[in-house]
């Protein structure tokens, strides 16, 4: 069942979304060569807790940190540690915050220093896919229109799409119905969007394979061929004639 949020719930999600957005946007200046992924995590923890919110991921199914920090071939769920960020790294940070019982969930991929033109285009295309997906959202459309719009960007550019990793509903719980795959699929064809639904849209692409391994820490997910991956995510409210990005400016 897909929950419909009332005005009061939406207002709490707006506040939560602004806190999550604030943490991620602050990282643009904070992430540089020489710091560790644990430093990034501490920045996020301090930001969220100093804004009267609680990190969504900390303790979620036992996850030990505030942010998932996934570097280069790590797709998602990287556990922050003493890994030092280097020039040329592609660092994805995924985080959420809970404000008065309501979650928001967002992710951004940061390019550290210099990288190739190809890598830069790849990261920017993944972000473009997020906004392509969001742009079609309004009451009455099929969820699959969002999935197709995202998947089309990957297809046109021959990027890998991980079928086991999807977007999701979000609200009182971090992960709610429905699943939102990043490519056209049968199940999403039967789901009609309604105003008041709140969805975490999150394209995750690779420059190579769509196959992944689970790391021995049983959290981190890496591309099987070691290819680069990128991840962008927003929490989005469906409205009568469009959408509102809750984790944006
Ligand atoms: Mg997320
Ligand atoms: Mg998510």
Image (cartoon, rainbow, N blue to C red):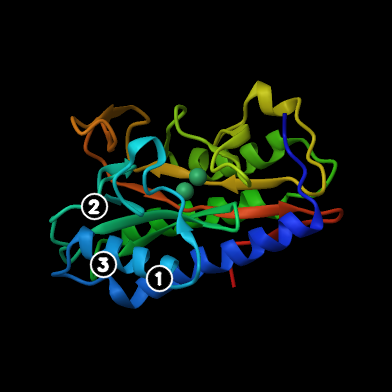
Comparing labels 3 and 1, the label whose residue is closer to the camera: 1
The tag on residue 221 is: none
**In the rendered image, the vertical position of residue 143 relative to residue 118, given as above or below:** above
Q: Earlier in the sequence, mark 3 or mark 1?
A: 1
The label on residue 112 is 3
Point 72% across, 28% down: residue: 1
Q: Quadrant of residue 124?
A: bottom left
- Specify whether 112 is left or right of 148: left
Assess mark 1: CB under 8 A from ligand 1?
no
- The CA distance from mark 3 to mark 1 is 21 Å
Provide residue 20's location: percent of width, then percent of height.
50, 63
Q: Is residue 100 left or right of residue 38?
A: right
- Of all residues shown, which one is farthest toward the top? 186
- x and y percent of residue 112 in the render? 26, 67
**From the viewer's perspective, is the residue at label 2 or at label 1 nearer?**
1
Inter-mark Cα distance, 2 to 3: 17 Å
Crowd class of label 2 (few under 14; some 14 to 19; many from 20; radius 10 Å) = many
Residue 47 circle label: 1
Q: At 36% across and 56% down in the image, what residue appears?
A: 93
Quadrant of the rendering where the C terminus is positioned: bottom right
Closest to the observer, 210 or 176? 176
Cβ atoms at labels 2 and 1 below 8 Å apart = no
Mark found first going from the N terminus, 2 or 3: 2
Q: Position of residue 78 (x, y in %)?
A: 28, 45
- Alpha carbons under labels 2 and 1: distance apart: 16 Å
Secondary structure type for disc 3: loop
Residue at the bottom extreme of this rendering: 29
168 or 120: nearer the viewer = 168
* Pointer 2 residue: 80
């Amino acid at each position: 069942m897909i929950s419909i949020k009332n005005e009061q719930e939406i207002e709490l999600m707006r506040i939560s979304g602004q806190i999550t957005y604030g943490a991620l946007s602050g990282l643009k200046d904070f992430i540089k060569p020489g710091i560790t992924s644990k430093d990034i995590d501490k920045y996020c923890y301090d930001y969220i807790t100093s804004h009267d919110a609680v990190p969504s991921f900390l303790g979620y199914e036992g996850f030990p940190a505030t942010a998932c920090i996934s570097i280069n071939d790590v797709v998602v769920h990287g556990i922050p540690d003493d890994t030092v960020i280097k020039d040329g790294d592609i660092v994805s940070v995924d985080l959420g915050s809970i404000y008065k019982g309501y979650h928001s969930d967002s992710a951004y991929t940061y390019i550290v220093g210099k990288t190739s033109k190809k890598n830069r285009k790849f990261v920017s295309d993944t972000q473009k896919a997020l906004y392509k997906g969001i742009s079609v959202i309004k009451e009455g459309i099929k969820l699959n229109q969002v999935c197709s719009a995202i998947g089309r960007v990957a297809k046109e550019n021959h990027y890998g799409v991980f079928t086991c990793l999807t977007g999701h509903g979000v609200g009182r719980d971090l992960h709610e119905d429905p699943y939102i795959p990043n490519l056209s699929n049968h199940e999403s064809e039967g789901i009609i969007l309604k105003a008041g639904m709140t969805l975490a849209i999150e394209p995750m692409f690779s420059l190579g394979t769509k196959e992944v391994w689970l790391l021995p820490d049983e959290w981190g997910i890496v591309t099987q061929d070691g290819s680069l991956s990128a991840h962008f995510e927003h929490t989005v409210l469906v409205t009568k004639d469009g959408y509102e990005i809750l984790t944006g400016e």
